[in-house]
Image (cartoon, rainbow, N blue to C red):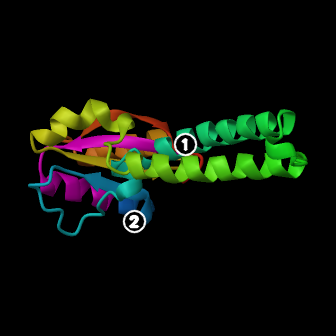
Amino acid sequence: MRRLYFLAPDIPTAKAIVDDLLCARITWRHIHVLADHSVTLEQLPQASLLQSSDVVHALERGVALGGVTGALLGLVALAFPPAQLAIAGGAVVMLTLTGAGFGAWTATMIGVNEPNTRLERFREAIRTGQLLIMADVPALREHEIEELIAQHVPRADLEGAEPTSPIFP
């Protein structure tokens, strides 16, 4: 899957883009529209928290850092057991999993309040009232859909494409 980005200057243009995407058999759940808080997105698929915040990136970092920290603590406890306790490999695994879980939880709490870093280049356009349409399309149909939108909605600006996150296709 590839994520296509389109900027629309107004709601009618955004609706035209969404209609063309739906006619091209891109399902509603694969279309996400992001706009400034002052713009009401009537009858448009609004971007969820996963698209608008940095929660996925924070989750990945939290699991990695928490897991590494838990594993290091487990290895230290294995090498220098506290109070003459016998610690085996199961404790290391348990501390690694606990660290990964705690890291995921805390990082997600932080990431949910941060704007999506992948959308930084669109921040100013969204602030000025434009609408960002993100469409997750099959990689083989990317050029076909780009041409369809360019042909039917000339006011739409194609802003590029990138692979979608493998965790949430």
Q: At label 2, which amino acid type do we have?
A: Trp
How far across and down, in percent of the image, does residue 125 sit?
Answer: 17, 36
Q: CA distance from mark 2 to mark 1?
A: 31 Å
Magenta residues span: 1-20
N-terminal of the pair, mark 2 or mark 1, is 2
Which marked residue is nearer to the observer: mark 2 or mark 1?
1
Side (left or right) of 137 relative to 48: right
Q: Judge the density around disc 1: few (<14), some (14-19), many (≥20) Cα neighbours within 10 Å.
A: many
How far across and down, in percent of the image, does residue 86 sit?
Answer: 91, 48
Along the line of sight, the residue nearer the viewer: 31 or 85:
85
Q: Quadrant of residue 147?
A: top left
Task: Say which mark, if any, is on residue 28.
Answer: 2
**Residue pictured at 52% horizontal, 47% vertical:** 59
Side (left or right) of 78 relative to 137: right
SS of the residue under disc 2: helix
SS of the residue under disc 1: helix
Relative vertical location of residue 53 with respect to residue 47 in this rendering, above or below: above
Q: Judge the density around disc 2: few (<14), some (14-19), many (≥20) Cα neighbours within 10 Å.
A: some
Along the line of sight, the residue nearer the viewer: 78 or 85:
85
| Residue bearing the label numbered 1 | 62
How far across and down, in percent of the image, does residue 81 sit?
Answer: 83, 40
